[in-house]
Image: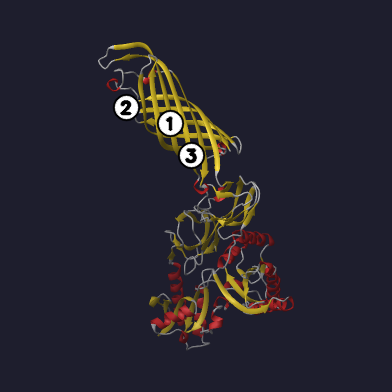
Amino acid sequence: MRIRHFSPIVRIFIILAALTSIHAQNSEAHLLKVAILPFENRTPNPNIDWVSSLFVDSYKTALGKRYRFQNVSETDTAKALEIIAEYRLSGKTRYQVFAAVTGAEVVMGGSFSPSGSDAILIESQLYAAHLDRLDVLDKQSTPIESSKLFPAVDRAASAAVALLKAGDKSGNEKPPLALPYLPRLAVYLPETNKATREEKAMRSAAEANLAGNGTHELVIAHEPALPAQGDERQKHLTREGLAYAVASEWVGSQLVLKLYSPLKAEALATFTGTGASREQSAAEAMKQVAAFLRGQRFHPQLEVTGLKGKDLQVELSGIKKRETSANGILRFEQQLPLGTDYVITIGTEPHSPAQRCFVLNATGRVTITGTNHIVVVCITQRYAIEGTVEGLTGGEVVVQVNDTERINLRENAPFRIPETFEDYEPLRLTIHSRPQAPPQQCDFINPPARVTGKNTKLRLYCMPLTQHWVTVSGSFPIMQGNSARAENLRPDASFPLNTLSGRFSVTAGYWAKYYLRYNILVGGEATYTYFQGTTDLYTSGGALVESGHTLFYHGIGLNALAGYPFKLPGNFFEKTRLVAFGGVGARYVSLRSSAPINLLSTLGPGAMVGFNWYYELSDRFQAGIRYHADLVYIPSEPYILQHAVGLQLGVRL
């Protein structure tokens, strides 16, 4: 047959222009597996989603009237549609995943989009899984009105199906649907000697030695269709979809063959057939071409698309493994000879974000162009986001996550965002309105910056515009670094304060919780510390002043404080908080003896840091363990550092 340049419309469907040798040899045993994908609703109106299902029946009926084919199983179809709906797949990815799950070799589908005020544009598409190719077959505009919509869908189906190619039919049966996908090898015969014994010998030799056997499709053509110029020849091979072309020429009684590729201007190799006759020369030359092709080795490779995660692992026939974290071509180092069967599987799926990957054309045979159209398509896992509302005492709060619909929350209860989100998707949490009866402030506490799998939880906390707390604690103080110098006391004496035994301290505080977004506590505390004990007084020279002297220490402080509560990880600590706080204030320190002698009486600055680990008994009460360190600076005296550990109670006003 002669290869010619097709018109632009027909060229879109060149993949349907000839029969594969497989279908030609046994069309009944190799009926194509065909699936119809519900059309994608690209209008802003979800109320016409029902139109999608109309196309399935119409296209299946139109196909059944013209061709024989094999339907995919209903179970696989339902599973594929669930995945498409769950992951909200669109465009070519819908076809790829649908074909991978159902095993369909041909998927027909399309979309409908707005076309004026009361009309839709129907676009029919064909996806060839073996070629990973998506083409537009037909476009038609129709009103949504039922009386016109139903006939328009049938017309669109018939128009699209009419563009498909049929294979050879046996008897009076309908022909099978044909879809060539193997790379094509064209053998060009000389223009002369048509219908001669030499031509028949060349055809027989080509068919005997260069038959596809699953590695290519053999096409017999004539020499004038192959341009002589290198660049023109390359364009011709590319335009006609040829992987290789074999040009033939008789030189005397010997047949000379030249092998060309669209990737190179000059010939890849030249073969000369020897023999006593032209028939023998043709057979020998064809054998040389076949041996050259059989001697080729190919690195298996595949295309990765949709990858967002890390460490995708792909396996070749369960032996060789490759990892990648990027889209594009993934190549194995191992080389495979022509005709080798292979299987591509997913070893480990990507993480961060978590993804699910499918392999198109996972099984196959190495062709004259290698491993063709193996595609790994990855889709990102989607998760629902849930949350809880706490502290709401009336009214409603309106929230939104990213671009989903707003939801109104009116009670302290769990809630769920109506949409799902991709793993690792950034989150934008917006509060559009807050309760007004009574007025409250609401905000998300420690919100996640992005989706983190199934563990993405939201906590919406509402409270009065200012939340007031009163705390009381009793502590056991311990003094450090506090030995007074004798020369600066009156009378001239020194004593170790840390030897005093009777001691206690109390604090009373007021806290206001402002700025819920930042979870900050501000407030003030009053502290009182008391020490009592018996000690010996000495002069700076070491002389005993008084033995068994009773000392009394009183410390009073006022502090301005700021705190920040931390939520501890784990369900066990769900109702506990660790509040770190610190602040500064004034201190009054008095030290007297039973003589009575005023050993020390002064006012100075102080600082306090500490933490409170409390348990929420209810919305109004909390109890916990408190620790603080109180530092007092006294001019011309050493510092007084006090550590206090005790219990603290809190009540919300």
- Dot in front, 1 or 2: 1
The quarter of the displayed image where residue 264 is located: bottom left
Q: Mark 2: which amino acid? A: Pro
The quarter of the displayed image where residue 574 is located: top right
Numbered label attached to residue 638: 2
Local crowd size for mark 1, using a 10 Å CA cut-off: few (<14), some (14–19), many (≥20): many
Circles 3 and 2, Cβ within 8 Å, touching? The answer is no
Q: Mark 1: which amino acid? A: Gly
In the rendered image, the quadrant that contains the C terminus is top right
- Judging by the rendered image, the residue that carries numbered circle 3 is 523
User: Disc 1 on helix, strand or loop?
Assistant: strand
Q: Mark 3: which amino acid? A: Gly
- What scheme was used to colour the molecule? secondary structure
Query: Vertical placement of 91 versus 558: above or below?
Result: below
* Residue 309 at x, y percent in the picture: 49, 55
Give left or right: position of 570 versus 630: right
- Judging by the rendered image, the residue that carries numbered circle 1 is 557
Between 108 and 524, the residue placed more toward the observer is: 524
Q: Earlier in the sequence, mark 3 or mark 2?
A: 3
Give left or right: position of 160 versus 648: right
Between 293 and 226, the residue placed more toward the observer is: 226
Circles 3 and 1, Cβ within 8 Å, touching? The answer is no
Q: Earlier in the sequence, mark 1 or mark 2?
A: 1
* Residue 603 at x, y percent in the picture: 37, 30
Q: Earlier in the sequence, mark 3 or mark 1?
A: 3
